[in-house]
Amino acid sequence: MRNISLFFGRFAKPVSVALGLLFAVSTLQAQDAKEGETLFKANCSTCHKVFGKFLGPELAGVSERHDEAWLLKWIHNAPAMIASGDAAAVALDAQFPNAAMTAFPQLSEDNIKNILAYVKAEEGKKAAGGDAAGGAAGAGGAAAASGDASNFMIIGLVAVIALAFGVILVLNKVIRTLERVLVNSKPIIPDLTEKAPGKDYMATLKRMAKNKKLVFFTVLLLAVFLGSAGWKTLWNVGVHEGYQPVQPIKFSHQLHAGVNQIDCAYCHGGAYKSKNASIPSANVCMNCHTAITASEKYDGELSPEIAKIYRALDYNPETMEYGPNKRPIEWVRIHNLPDFAYFNHSQHVVVAGVECETCHGPINTMEEVYQYSPLTMKWCIDCHQRTEVNADNAYYEQLIAAHEQLKKGEKVTAAMLGGLECGKCHY
């Protein structure tokens, strides 16, 4: 028992120091090149390359050309900076007149810093070259692995460290108590060679059950385990990020929106004029697929996925006539908000100018659509706190006019403030 005490006493301080250093590294490491690579490919790669000009300027050396604060503002809302007359923003826009920089309000400051970290990592790989580049990539991967800590993870790490300190203190106290018991009393460990094993085990369990400190420590560990498991379960209730159901027709957004570059509004026109984005009817599909019926994949024969559209419309491709036995395509809904949450597509897309990719992710690269964003209240609030209000629209002009009338003591009705819009009452 004395050896055990010395063992814990010898390693308690080094373990405490190591945990402290781990916490410090986790909190200081804010830039994640690996995460930056993912964000770069999803948001930046359509216009930019790290090395060489594309639609936009080369990103290598961007941190040397502009300071970080300017880059954060520029990537968040480049059009606003250009409109404000910022000299660097206006000059950069003039260099690439055919490739206007879009706003990315969905990216947090940490996201942008991660993208810049990825660019610097790529610069380092090119500068090092050969085996040195491989070593730098390995070091960058290790740094990225240690930089995955979000605020929630850091709080969890603090809790783990505090729990570890508590465990060490409790164990040391238990060991000292046992040492005093061994010194001042008779041996409490029975001679197993003289008694039946079953009786000895039961006696040992009874003695353990009477040890209040041991029982307390066991109950504490059980409570921590159940509490953390319950917290994780409750935290993810209703969160369906990554949800990807099997659809009745294998419609590829990568082919239609990516390769063929069909605009989102062609199929989802409701996003620009109503609360719902709407699922297109099969007749919209037939605008193209009355002529496009085959694929090289099927040696010129009718594609089985297009055949499903024909069956739904009872369409005969040989006579080009529709029959009477039409039936709807039973699509499975992916993005679904709770009934108590009100979301209006037209308000965000038309008034706020939010891009579809902000919520739905890189839809033009998805072979099968999945829920890209968590769609939680925190996620929405974070976006609202970052996004600047565009006051240059008719809604705010009506508000200003109404305020002027109120100042003059004139009558202002609810209709003047949009009270006659259908969406106010009808979902």
Image (tube, rainbow, N blue to C red):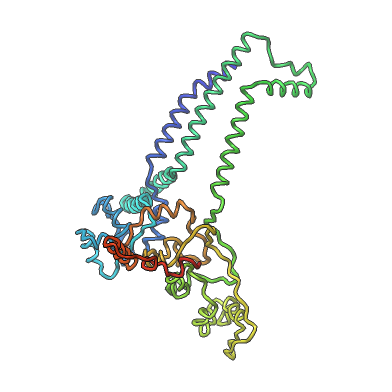
Q: Is residue 314 left or right of residue 28?
A: right
Residue 356 locus on image (x, y percent): 42, 65
Query: For residue 25, which quarter of the picture?
Result: top left
From this view, report whether residue 389 is shown above or below residue 321. Answer: above
Query: For residue 98, which quarter of the picture?
Result: bottom left
Residue at the image position 54 percent from the left and 71 percent from the top:
251
Residue at the image position 70 percent from the left and 16 percent from the top:
189
Residue at the image position 47 percent from the left and 37 percent from the top:
157
Residue 181 locus on image (x, y percent): 62, 12
From this view, report whether residue 364 is shown above or below residue 5. Answer: below
Q: Nearer the viewer, residue 315 or 49?
A: 315
User: Farthest residue in the bottom direction?
Assistant: 319
**Residue 130 appears in the rendering:** no
**Residue 98 appears in the rendering:** yes
Q: Nearer the viewer, residue 30 or 18?
A: 30
Quarter placement of the N terminus:
top right
Residue 29 locus on image (x, y percent): 38, 42
From this view, report whether residue 189 is shown above or below residue 254. Answer: above
